[in-house]
Each structure stands twice: as C-alpha cells, then as structure tokens.
C-alpha cells in the first residue's frame, strides 16, 4: 500500500541519523552489524535503514557494554543462547542436526546459510526469534538466569 510504505519510509532512519541520535559513530553501528548483533533492513541499493526498535536495541547494546561491562563477543554468545527452537516450529529431528541448536557461538540469524530451509529463506527481521532476542529485558533475564545458575554451582 502506498500510504503504508510512505509511513514506513518516514519512520525509517539512515545510519548517520541513528549514529547522531545515539551519539555513537557510524563505524560502531557497522561493527555491531558485522558482529551479528543487529540486522538493519537493507534497501535494494544496500542502504541500511533502522526503525525505532533498532534504535532501542542499539541503545541496549551500548548499555550492556557500558553498564554491564560486556563486550561484543559476550553479547553475541548471549544472543546465541536464545532458544530459537522453542519459538520456531522445529521438529526434534531438525534440532538434532541444526547448528543453531548445537553451537552457541553466534545467534541463529548470523549463521543463516548453514540452517535448514525454514530459516535459510526467512526474513529474520520479521522472525519472532530475532524480535524477541533483540530486546534488552529478554537479554537481561537470560543473563541474570545464567549468572544465578553459575552462582548456584559455585556454592
Ligand atoms: S528465521 Fe532467522 S531469526 Fe528466525 S530462527 Fe531462523 S535464523 Fe533465527
């Protein structure tokens, strides 16, 4: 729909605008993308576009780094622990061979090419897994859950 597309375009921000809004550099946003932490929308010409959820998520990444002392690798591994198989309709058989289940080094959307067709052909930005993972509150819950389990093992 033309009206809807115009509306979306109005809400979409270019990388320079987002960098200014968050007071970070364009290179930093690109680095987060390369690390697999964020998936901006890309136009046919390869231009990155960000919506309000992306900006919230970028802000969350900044806070995890500044306030929680995390680094990019730590955040990536945390995202990799998101149980996508509980959200996508994967069968037990799928799970036995899926790299997203077997490896915990990067989020599923960063290893898409190695995944079964259900993921390989999907638009991750529209997937409930990416949308759920890229929320500060969900990530913090996961982080605190891991810390709690680690402490319980220590004492
Ligand atoms: S569609 Fe993308 S984000 Fe969703 S589970 Fe598959 S790889 Fe992950």
Image (cartoon, helix red, strand yellow):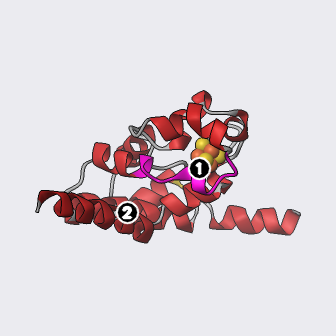
Tell which of 151 and 48 is nearer to you. Answer: 151
* Residue extending furthest toward the right: 1
Q: For the C terminus, give its image quadrant.
A: bottom left
State the image coordinates of residue 49 (x, y, percent, origin top left).
Answer: 59, 52
Report the side of 46 relative to 53 (left or right): right
Q: For the N terminus, give its image quadrant.
A: bottom right
Q: Magenta residues? A: 79-90
State the image coordinates of residue 135 (x, y, percent, origin top left).
Answer: 47, 65
Q: Secondary structure at mark 1?
A: helix
Determine if residue 127 is in view: yes
Q: Secondary structure at mark 2?
A: helix
Q: Which mark is residue 142?
A: 2
**Mark 2 close to ligand 1, CB under 8 Å:** no
State the image coordinates of residue 13 (x, y, percent, origin top left).
Answer: 57, 60
Tell which of 88 and 152 is nearer to you. Answer: 152
Report the side of 54 relative to 75 (left or right): right
For the residue carrying disc 1, how many other residues have a C-alpha within 10 Å: few (<14), some (14-19), or many (20+)? Answer: some
User: How many labels, in total?
Assistant: 2
**Is 82 a magenta residue?**
yes
* Residue extending furthest toward the left: 155
**Is 66 a magenta residue?**
no
Q: Residue at x 49, y 58 (%)?
A: 133
Callout in the foreground (1, 2): 1
Q: Which residue is mark 1?
A: 85
Report the side of 139 relative to 45 (left or right): left
| Residue 141 sits in quarter | bottom left
| Residue 137 sits in quarter | bottom left
Tell which of 46 and 145 is nearer to you. Answer: 145
């Amino acid at each position: 729909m033309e009206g809807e597309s115009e509306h979306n375009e109005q809400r979409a921000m270019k990388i320079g605008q987002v960098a200014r809004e968050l007071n970070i550099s364009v290179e930093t946003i690109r680095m987060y993308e390369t690390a697999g932490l964020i998936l901006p929308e890309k136009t046919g010409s390869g231009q990155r576009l960000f919506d309000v959820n992306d900006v919230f998520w970028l802000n969350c990444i900044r806070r995890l780094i500044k306030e929680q002392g995390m680094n990019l690798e730590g955040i990536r591994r945390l995202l990799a622990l998101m149980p996508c198989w509980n959200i996508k309709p994967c069968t037990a058989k799928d799970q036995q061979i899926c790299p997203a289940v077997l490896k915990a080094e990067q989020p599923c959307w960063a290893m898409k090419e190695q995944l079964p067709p259900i993921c390989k052909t999907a638009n991750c930005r529209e997937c409930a897994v990416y949308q759920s993972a890229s929320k500060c509150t969900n990530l913090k819950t996961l982080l605190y859950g891991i810390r709690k389990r680690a402490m319980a093992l220590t004492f």
